[in-house]
Image (cartoon, rainbow, N blue to C red):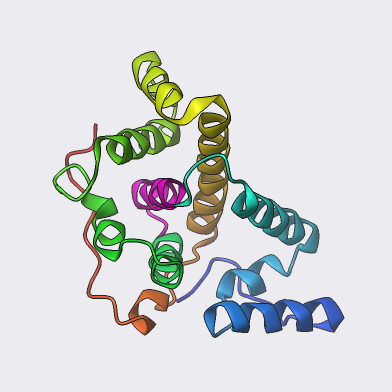
Amino acid sequence: MTSRIPPTEITGVQGALMKTIARRMVGTVPEPLGVLWHHRAVLNATMSLGRKANRWDECDRDLKSYAHMAVASLIGCSFCLDMGYFQARNEGLDLTKAREVPRWRESDAFTPVERDVLTYAEAMSQTPPTVSDELSGRLLKLLGAPGLIELTAFIGAANLAARMNVALGIEAQGFAATCGLPPLARPSANRA
């Protein structure tokens, strides 16, 4: 893997702590940590947002995970998908569904609510966004206002991470392979 900005050595007390936490969570120090170490304020802000977003509890965690993987698939963030599959396994997410996210339109694994969430994630990730009033209305009825707001913010954060990784050339590191997951589904050619 070759990022556009080479990772730098992660040093100091904060660096040692971050490396320890990363190894405990994923077994290694992910490359983005070394890349973002060049600008610690950005690293700290993005990590803080991620930690806070993971504590939000108005929207089902599985729905948010599928949405994040849909964003990563659409944008082409192999690192995000790789990490998403790894986290799916470790967090007890339905692995069949997780693997099918990149081709969710052709898959029969998803419920109508999950399909609406995946549609919403992709619509939000278009430039410009293509979210319809009809889709928002259905999700508002299904998730409630706090749930829809949380899902929207979570998808926005997923876009931040995925677009940053793609722009910086950060790619998959093989996390999914260490879990013994079979090859990942390919994104659908039928994007709407």
In the image, taking residue 1 as reference, residue 53 lies left or right, namely right
Residue 72 on the magenta span: yes
Residue displayed at 13% across by 45% down:
106
Position above or below: 188 against 8: above
Quarter in which the N terminus is drawn: bottom left
Position above or below: 147 against 160: above
Viewer-closest of 116 and 20:
116
Residue displayed at 48% across by 51% down:
61
Q: Tell me which secondary structure the magenta stretch mostly adopts.
A: helix
Residue 29 image offset from top left, x and y in percent? 60, 81
Position above or below: 79 against 116: below
Residue 178 on the magenta span: no
In the image, taking residue 67 as reference, residue 159 lies left or right, namely right
Callout count: 0
Position above or below: 164 against 14: above
Residue displayed at 29% across by 65% down:
95
Quarter in which the C terminus is drawn: top left
Residue 50 image offset from top left, x and y in percent? 63, 55
Q: Magenta segment range? A: 62-77
Q: Residue extending furthest right?
A: 13
